[in-house]
């Protein structure tokens, strides 16, 4: 079993910061696609991913017990993962 971690806008969109998934043998890209389709979460396409606290490319093969993190962009610039939140803030 693997642990998937979500931060910031992704956490808010899913409603939790952690999900358990049997992802051993899948690539990181396949995990991303599974998350995108199961949670209707297109924002994962713009996020960095890490495996066991190291940034990793999408062709990384996941092994049993790996911890996978989805990290949205952060800074003062436009954050695609929280764009809907920012848009609603400007409408007030």
Image (cartoon, rainbow, N blue to C red):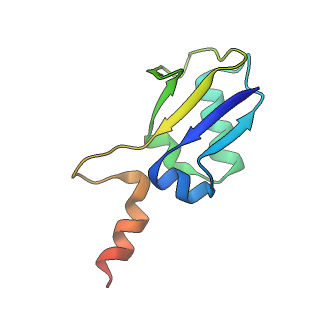
Rendering coords of residue 16 (x, y %): 62, 52
Rendering coords of residue 53 (x, y %): 47, 23
Q: Nearer the viewer, residue 9 or 58?
A: 9
User: Which quarter of the image is occupied by the N terminus?
Assistant: top right
Q: Nearer the viewer, residue 64 or 35?
A: 64
Q: Is residue 38 above or below residue 24?
A: below
User: Which quarter of the image is occupied by the C terminus?
Assistant: bottom left
Q: Is residue 73 above or below residue 58?
A: below
Left or right: where does residue 68 sit relative to residue 1?
A: left
Rendering coords of residue 69 (x, y %): 53, 33
Corner quadrant of residue 55: top left
Q: Nearer the viewer, residue 46 or 75?
A: 75
Kindly identify the residue that appears in the image at 29 percent across and 76 percent down: 90
Q: Is residue 70 above or below residue 42?
A: above
Kindly identify the residue that appears in the image at 60 percent across and 35 percent down: 32
Q: Is residue 89 above or below residue 39?
A: below
Kindly identify the residue that appears in the image at 54 percent across and 50 percent down: 42
Left or right: where does residue 38 sit relative to residue 89?
A: right
Q: Nearer the viewer, residue 36 or 19?
A: 19
Residue furthest bottom as drawn: 92
Left or right: where does residue 71 sit relative to residue 24?
A: left
Kindly identify the residue that appears in the image at 43 percent across and 52 percent down: 81
| Numbered circles on residues, count | 0
């Amino acid at each position: 079993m693997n642990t998937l971690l979500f931060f910031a806008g992704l956490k808010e969109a899913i409603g939790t910061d952690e999900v358990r998934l049997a992802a051993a043998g899948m690539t990181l890209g396949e995990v991303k696609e599974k998350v995108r389709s199961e949670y209707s979460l297109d924002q994962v396409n713009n996020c960095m991913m890490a495996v066991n606290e190291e940034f990793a490319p999408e062709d990384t093969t996941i092994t049993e017990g790996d911890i996978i993190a989805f990290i949205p962009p952060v800074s003062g610039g436009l954050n695609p993962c929280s764009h809907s939140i920012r848009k609603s803030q400007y409408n007030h």
